[in-house]
Image (cartoon, grey):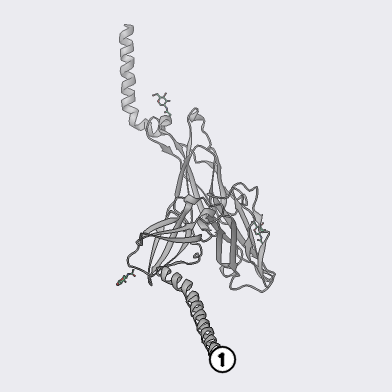
Amino acid sequence: MALICLAIGCLYTFLICTAFGYTLSPNTEIKVNPPQDFEIVDPGYLGYLCLQWKPPLSLDNFMGCTIEYELKYRNIDNERWTTIITKNLHYKDGFDLNKHIEAKIHTLLPVQCTNGSVVQSSWSEATYWASPQGNVETKIQDMDCVYYNWQYLFCSWKPGIEVHFDTNYNLFYWYEGLDHALQCVDYIEANGKNIGCRFPFLEASDYKDFYICVNGSSESKPIRSSYFIFQLQNIVKPLPPDYLSITVKNSYEINLKWNIPRGPIPAKCFIYEIEFTEDGATWMSTTDENEMYILRTNESLQLCFLVRSKVNIYCSDDGIWSEWSDEQCWKGDIWKKTLSFLFMPFGFASLFLLLITCLLLYKQKAILKMIFHKKN
Ligand SMILES: *[C@@H]1O[C@H](CO)[C@@H](O)[C@H](O)[C@H]1NC(C)=O
Ligand SMILES: *[C@@H]1O[C@H](CO)[C@@H](O)[C@H](O)[C@H]1NC(C)=O
Ligand SMILES: *[C@@H]1O[C@H](CO)[C@@H](O)[C@H](O)[C@H]1NC(C)=O
């Protein structure tokens, strides 16, 4: 009896489930709210921003469930969004503050919390623009930064076009590891205006984003700020190589050699470009080594080369060629030259001696003649 009751009970349950199954599911559809208080915060690091948010409301149904967030952001004129999936409540990245920034975020419920597919909330959105003052013409122009020999950073610029003569510019910089943005302490000036900056030693600054802001002030009108982001290892300009040498072995093998530029750049980080001239015909080549073996094509009389250096792709994404080294030459007729150089003075001396001897002999003859004449 009990068994039959149970069976009937089961049948009822089954019928109810199948009858209401489809209509019930929309009612029990799992929904989740978007994150709260989504905002873009500028901590004053000249482009390194923090995107932050709070957990969505009414999460009680998902106790023990790890909630994730899908975050998308971009500078407004970028086609592509950067997408991040995170369990945290903040995310930091570098942005170009010359432009508008937009970001959006939604909550994700993973499959294990929903007995099915991933559930997403609607988007929360936020935008940011570092309140731009002044018109674009007041910005500095032609900003140029070079990291000389991976040691000394140097930036220079030209004043904006439409600026009053009282305008002056200031440079601020920041990278991860500094507590706050610092102002340049050693400006390069022209007519009392800042047109560049010599940076101090920048400890632990490689392979991370380096942020610069050049803003300005003027009594007459506001000045638009300019922002720059780069990595220092990508703007290194090394010293040129020195102590070049050419060795010609068995009259057809040539060995070109030079010294690795002095300074902190490791030897394995260099690429060299060689400009080689053989009797007026010139070619170029590159190598990662600080020497090169080549074959002499002709019985050339003069070989010359010069070298310049750059940081290679194993140590940076980009670089600036050094100046060219001094030229080093080798002369094929060196023996003839040496011979003539050695023997020319010697020949002259011999000739001179011969002349004097002759003269003396001649004089002696004359004297002897005189004596004989007297005797007679
Ligand atoms: C998922 O299914 C299990 C049992 O199958 C159930 O206990 C749990 O409540 C369900 N979770 C949700 C979010 O529907
Ligand atoms: C220039 O930028 C720095 C750093 O962000 C800021 O402290 C300073 O007030 C700005 N100056 C002007 C004139 O906007
Ligand atoms: C080698 O000599 C030939 C003719 O003697 C000349 O045409 C050629 O340009 C020379 N090559 C070089 C590299 O000087």
| Residue 112 location, quadrant | top left
335 or 37: which is nearer to us? Answer: 335
The residue carrying pointer 1 sits among few (fewer than 14), some (14 to 19) or many (20 or more) residues within 10 Å by Cα, namely few
Disc 1 residue type (three-letter): Lys
Task: Answer above or below: position of 174 versus 335.
Answer: above
Location of residue 233 with respect to 56 vertically, above or below: below
Q: Quick check: 244 above or below 314?
A: below
Depth order, front residue of 361/129 = 361
- Residue 25, visible in the rendered structure: yes
Q: Secondary structure at mark 1?
A: helix
Residue at the farthest front position: 376
Q: Residue at x 49, y 27 (%)?
A: 64
Residue 130: tell me if it is visible.
no
- Residue closest to the eye, 307 or 44: 307
The N terminus sits in image quarter:
top left
Residue 324 position in % (x across, y down): 49, 65
Dot 1 corresponds to which residue?
375
Say which of 246 and 292 sits in front. 246
